[in-house]
Image (tube, helix red, strand yellow):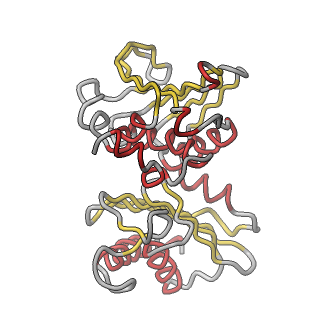
Amino acid sequence: MTPEYIRERPSMFIGDTGEKGLHSLVKDTIKTILVDPTITYLDISLSGPIVNGRQRVGFRYDGTPERALTDYVKNHIGLNVVSALSSTFEKFASHYYNKYNSVNVESNRISFIPDVEIFGDRRFSFDILRDMVELMGYLHSNIAFNLHDHLFVRDFTYKHENGLIELVKKLTTQEVVGEPIYFKSNQAGMEVEVAIQRVIGPGKSITAYVNDELSEEGGVHVEALRGELDMFKFDNYAAVLSVRLENPKFEGQSKTKLINGDGGFYSGSLYYSLVDIIADNLIKCRDKL
């Protein structure tokens, strides 16, 4: 896939060339970096205005040096899209002091400037980036995220040790009953992570993500969890569900509704695998139910 092909049809890859598409460049870069399982620290910085009013976004991260900038990131389609839609795109290695591990390590850097020909004079919103990075902190509890704004000298660090447990507590607006029920499983080629908070009063809400993308329209993963919670007699609850799988299938290009790659909505292999995983783990949590 050539840069010219991507530039001719950017909306096919990032949704649009407006505010959402602009910020998706940052998210796609973060998600690509996080494919490396050795990463424990990610620093994201937003510079002040430069040529033509554009801003540079920089990323610094640890991880295994020999893996960095190779298969995990160099050839990833996400970074190919970011590079094609940027006027400047750089990646290189350097050294820095990791305050979390108290050691000097080789770090890796990526930086880019969105192309004004694609995005016009749109600017990054620090508030949108902050919300994005904070959410990543919940979804990746093993990683410390730092966000810097060099123009207004703002600095935020997100390290949510309890991940989805903290997120479901944040999202729950009703009076709660007890502590959240939590489980995480790696089975059938996918990672399934769930936090469930019982609440007082009517309501059954599920906030779901597939590979860090919000499933605004639900999907088979949401229906699998909802069905099993009904089977286990959960009356009122707020739940957060995160699923990671290699080749998810979605309804449409928006990637907001997960579907089966085979069979019908309730008869495909993905749906049945999710039902089995969720049921098995709820049984293991039976003393908390």
In the picture shown, does residue 180 fall above or below 136?
below
Question: Residue at point 61% right, 19% down?
Answer: 50
- Image x and y of residue 272, in percent: 33, 79
In the picture shown, does residue 33 fall above or below 243?
above
- Image x and y of residue 282, in percent: 44, 73
Give the quarter of the image for residue 234: bottom right
Q: Tag count in the figure? A: 0
- Image x and y of residue 128, in percent: 65, 43
- Image x and y of residue 252, in percent: 44, 69
Question: Residue at point 53% right, 29% down?
Answer: 44
In the picture shown, does residue 209 fall above or below 111?
below
Question: Residue at point 63% right, 83% down?
Answer: 235
Q: Is residue 288 left or right of residue 109?
A: right
Give the quarter of the image for residue 217: bottom right
Question: Residue at point 40% right, 62% down?
Answer: 192
- Tell me if residue 193 can be seen: yes
In the picture shown, does residue 271 fall above or below 210?
below
Figure quadrant of the C terminus: bottom right
Figure quadrant of the N terminus: top left
Give the camera-side residue of 287 and 136: 136
Give the quarter of the image for residue 70: top left
Give the camera-side residue of 178 and 259: 259
- Tell me if residue 181 can be seen: no
